Amino acid sequence: MASIIDRASAPEAPFPWAPKPPDFRFSTDDFPEADRVAIFREVVGRQMLRQEIEPLADHPFQVHGTARPLPGGLFAVWSTCTPHNLQRTRRLLSDGDDSLLFQWTTTARLAEHLGREMILEPGDAVLFSCAEPRSAAMRSSFKTITIKAPRNMLGPLLLAPDSCIGRPVPASSDALRLLLRYLEVLREESATMSRAVQDLAVAHVCDLLAVAFGATRDAADSAGRRGVRAARLLTIKRDIEASLADTELSVADVAARHCMTPRSLQMLFEESGTTFTQFLREQRLARAHRMLRSRRFDAERIIDIALAVGFADISYFNRAFRARYGATPSDVRVSNV
């Protein structure tokens, strides 16, 4: 136990004992059962997250999550947890951190911050100040997303930063739902992004946080051009990727699902340097290519693979595949043997 805690003793880094690159997955299962709570409270709670964690006595304590630092001082944590209480105590305020902390959970919770009590419903989000004590009580197991942003990064984008703190944003908020969808993509992909793309993703997150909690006019205009549109396009792309097998999939179908006009959707793709049709074809060809190279699909006929990824015309599939990969589907399958 002591050796693990000793490695976590330097408070200047988010998690100085984590491996590099600094994308750290943590779990209570990583610690000896007898000392699990004590180690987790010290290493992950006090040293990494800078808050006290108090498990509820009648629930076996389990936490599993991923913590990821991003450019500009942004710090993100995705986790699943059993019921517990959290506190950022006055003693822990000695780190001098005045960041703004976004927190979203899937369970109801009672929070206290700046002398006010808040009852947060499942799916609500709230912004805390790390410069002030806070507490939260979660009485059932939950998933949570936490984003810590330096005040000098997020604050200028907010219309009234101080009034945003401790003011819940309801789960029904369109801006919040868009932010959460973008954060899910960030969780899946940010570890492999280049630094330039990470910088852009951080700007998008700040844009979406500002829109959710109340952006200045300039920030709202910027978010409309940048963060909100980027998040919406990512969501649409995920929708398309999940619908590739639909041979009748059209821009009108996708636009209707996202409450947009077909022209607005087309413009989002054009701004990214492609079109709806090009993106759809590329994703279908890429999935077919992966299937042809996988031994799992050796028994599948090429025509069945083409249909499975949404090509109703086998002749068109063969022409498009050869134009994209410089080889026929049969050639790719044979070369993989």
Image (cartoon, grey):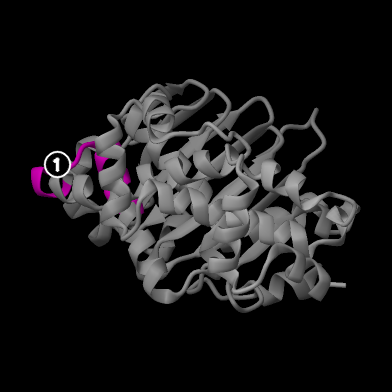
Quarter of the picture containing the N terminus is bottom right
In the rendered structure, the answer to whether residue 320 lies left or right of residue 233 reads right
Foreground of the two, 171 or 46: 171
The part of the image, by quadrant, that contains residue 329 is bottom right
Q: Is residue 116 above or below residue 2?
A: above
- Vertically, is 133 above or below 57? below
> Which image quarter: residue 107?
top right
The x, y position of residue 332, in whole percent, is 74, 69
Span shown in magenta: 205-219
Magenta span: chief secondary structure: helix
For image coordinates 24% across by 53% down, the residue present is 226
**Does residue 93 appear to the left or right of 271 in the view shown?**
right
Near-viewer residue (314 or 102): 314
Secondary structure at numbered mark 1: loop
Residue 307 among those drawn in magenta? no
Residue 206 pos. (x, y %): 31, 52
| Residue 260 visible in the shown view | yes
Residue 307 location, quadrant: top right
Residue 206 drawn in magenta: yes
Give x and y (percent) for residue 181: 47, 41
Q: Nearer the viewer, residue 281 or 239?
A: 281
Image quadrant in which the C terminus is located: bottom right
Identified by mark 1, the residue type is Leu
Residue at the spot of label 1:
159
163 with respect to 178 (left or right): left
Q: Which residue appears at 30% of the width and 59% of the height?
A: 203
